[in-house]
Image (cartoon, coloured by chain):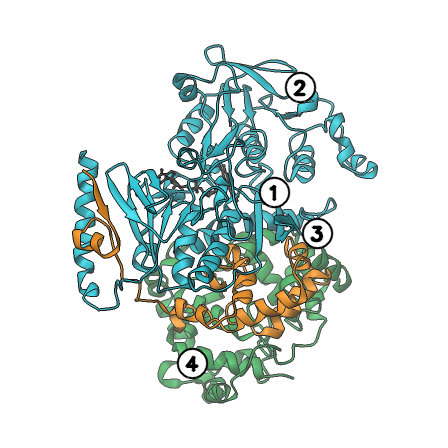
Chain colours: A cyan, B green, C orange
Amino acid sequence: MSTMNRRNFLKFTTAAAAATPFLAGKSAFAADEKHIVVIGGGVGGATFAKYMRLYAPEVKVTVIERKKEYQRPYGSSEIIVGNVDMNDITISYDALQKKHGVNFVFDTVTGVDFDKREVSTENGTKITYDRLVVAPGISFDYSGIAGMDTEAAQQAIVHGWDAGDQLLTLQKQLEAVPVDGTVVVVPPPNPYRCPPGPYERAGLITQWLINRGDKNAKVIILDPKNGFTTDVTMLQAWNRLYGFNLPKAFEKNYKPEQVATFTKHETPGKIQWVMAEEGGRVVKVDVAAKTVEAEAGVFKADMINIIPPLKAGKIALDLGLADKSGWCPVDQKTFESTLHPLVHVIGDACIAGEMPKSGYSANSQAKVVALQIKALLAGQPTIEPVLQNTCYALAGQSDYGMFVADVFRLKDGKLKRADQPRYLPFNASTAQYRLSAVYLHAWMDSFTQDIFS
Amino acid sequence: MNRSITLVGVAALIAMSTNSFANEHGASKARADAPSTEVAWTPETLALIRSGNAQKGGQLAHEQMCASCHGHAGIAQSSNWPSLAGQRAEYTYKMLQDYKNGSRNTYPLMTVLAQPMSDQDMADIAAFYASFKLPPVPVGTPIDKALADKAELLVMKGDGNRLLAPCMSCHGYKGEGNVIDVPAMAGQTPEYFIRTMQDYKTGKRSNDVYSRMRLMAHVLSDQEIIELANYYANLTQ
Amino acid sequence: MNKTITGALAVALGFVVMVPAAIANPEQTANGAQSPAAVMAAQTCGGCHGTMGQVKDNAFMPLAGMPTSQFVLAMKSFANGSRPSTLMGPLAASFSDAEIQAMAEYFAAIPKFQHEANK
Ligand SMILES: Cc1cc2nc3c(=O)[nH]c(=O)nc-3n(C[C@H](O)[C@H](O)[C@H](O)COP(=O)(O)OP(=O)(O)OC[C@H]3O[C@@H](n4cnc5c(N)ncnc54)[C@H](O)[C@@H]3O)c2cc1C
């Protein structure tokens, strides 16, 4: 046992001892009590644990999580530009344990014996379950980008897409960008966590450079895609704020009269989006020379932020819960794995039809699974699911917000978006942008409360 | 006679305790030396408000999406937000200014909306809401008549022992408000009323000139605040 | 070290922080009485409006304890655009009348989140 582990061990022992008086009651752990084990205490796992206890207090829930505190990825790009600090995005598991009676084991899951229904951890603990919920988030796949496949390269050019210290690295790298320097941001191909996220980050960096006083700094987005969630509203905002010119190849996504409202900026903008059709796909990175080679040519940068292709969290891959896409197929009504019975996969790791990989999706899926597991444990029919996603994003300026919002229902076994407008309208008023930014920040708090308190 | 004595008492109390009040409350502490408002009732300001164009104000209110919370005709869409119908223009104008410059910082969303507004915009919007009649009893929120009745004594007589002036001495017999910026409260949504009084009581809201509402709210019990909320919600013209 | 821990045994050994499942907080009891379909529809609101609509931030409307008629009117007027909004318009339009009614009844039955001082 390492020191850290011994400390954890002592803490558990003490906490359990303190709880002993409650355990004297006869009903505390009846033999037939159902036990749900959760892998991962992120948005999906923590929401599930809280709501399972809320919906069915008679069920015991144990979360196995490798970190003692959660750092939320949602809203974390604001660390890079100094709008918030690490304390603001760090969340305690106290309320889940004390208020909601969720058990926590702080350890890393290393294996599951599906026949014995038994989870094992790095420290050698084994825990049996009646049903298992797997919510391990994402892992990163650098294999497709030449020059990025070494540990050293991945430490020099970080993604910052899973919270943690990489955000501070990015913050330092941004501060070190010389006046009027160039920053390259590389979003991943679909599907990935937080669809508007890479573009919001590029906007935040642009705004930061402007605030610093740079007149000619540049943020270049090299994209393997031809569009992204919130693109029509985001590009309109950049046209207004950052001298951004609409790529010719993208004009077809607007009505002609809408294109006419875009300003044609004489000098190229402070932010530039090279879409796939115009050669945005990155093929090679030279870490030492700080160059990124895309199909359109070689870009020299002072700072590079690459978010590589994503897959389901490593443990989901190791357990054989993913298919060849790298994500986990599930029955989209109950989120039960189609590869292993009695195992539900939620959050970024699962394939949920048209639902994006977002915190809101993970939260909504977790509640649905809590309801379905409650029904299944009681031998009742599962319920027709309704799910929702709302992602807010900033254009860069902290008072210019936008969003995507969708409701999802099951249709022919797949979760499909309800056919409604999902963005702010093209002719939205200033008040609507400003309010969206207010709601974005309010959401960070209310959403965190819904999961963790 | 009774009334003027009480008012003098209140004035003395205000003079004595403004500082200590501010100090013992965290929220106002941060701004202890900031003025409670930056709006001064100069003849120019009053003339500007009088010149407010209600029709333009209606257009602005539409653009700013005021109706989403305050209703198309200033009658709140839910129990949580205030009705603005029939509100004194000076009060609405002052609130918009106070939001804009941070004197009223209880609700960041309103600050964000007020920031782009000019003085004239605010006068127009104030005129727009002042052009309506005061609201009827809020719909959808059950008003407790028995609770409302209990507040009558405070409203009509105040409480000399606690140096509490009767509410009506400033806010009017029918809750219609008073010169210059004493707000109307008749038909106000009770939850908003309670929140406002609690914010005054704790000092979280501090844009009342001379602390006059903070001093009142400070000595009111939570139960009395609830009774008053029911009283004013139920009071219609 | 290789230990097999199940339920009660884990507690006895003291490796896992165990809180008895039987101790329920008031929120838990409030959910029991609701129909599963209503709980299902209402859960979609929680990510912004707080767990069971008991949000503690005043930018979003608390839904807990809102009278049914007020909820239904709000959703319908968001959906048909007569009440201006940022995103509530399209969202409200995505729910059926039956879902809106079910949500309304769910939230009306949940106790309001009380101002600390008014508890
Ligand atoms: C910059 C950025 C901005 C974003 N903004 C938004 C936004 O505005 N709105 C929105 O809805 N979403 C946003 N997101 C996305 C959101 O954060 C994720 O979609 C969400 O966190 C996914 O939840 P999850 O439970 O699947 O994974 P996570 O939240 O990543 O949780 C996974 C947990 O599992 C644990 N874990 C993994 N493996 C193991 C193991 N073997 N043993 C034990 N524990 C393990 C991890 O430690 C982690 O705590 C953003 C993301 C980023 C990066």
Is there CB contact under 8 Å for labels 2 and 1?
no
Give the labeled residue for mark 4: B224
Q: How far apart are marks 2 and 1 (CA)?
A: 29 Å
Q: Where is residue B90 in the image (x, y as percent from the top left)?
A: 62, 66
Residue A279: which disc? Answer: 2
> What residue is drawn where x is 49% and y is 10%?
A289
Is there CB contact under 8 Å for labels 1 and 4?
no
Q: Distance between the residues labelled 1 and 3?
A: 23 Å
Q: Position of residue A169 (x, y in %)?
A: 40, 27
Q: Distance between the residues labelled 4 and 2?
A: 69 Å
Residue C93 in view in this figure: yes
> Callout 1: few (<14), some (14-19), or many (20+) C-alpha neighbours within 10 Å?
many
Q: Nearer the viewer, mark 1 or mark 3?
A: 3
Q: Nearer the viewer, mark 2 or mark 1?
A: 2
Q: Distance between the residues labelled 3 and 2?
A: 32 Å
Assign ligand 1 to one image quadrant: top left
> Callout 2: few (<14), some (14-19), or many (20+) C-alpha neighbours within 10 Å?
some
Nearest to the observer: residue A138 or residue A385: A385
Q: Nearer the viewer, mark 4 or mark 2?
A: 2
**Mark 1 sits near ligand 1, with its Cβ under 8 Å away:** no
Q: In which quarter of the image is residue A392?
A: top right
Q: Outermost residue toward the front?
A: A115
Nearest to the observer: residue B22 or residue A63: A63
In the figure, A225 relative to A145: above or below?
below
Element on which disc 1 rests: loop
Q: Nearer the viewer, mark 3 or mark 4?
A: 3
Element on which disc 2 rests: loop
Type of amino acid under label 4: Glu
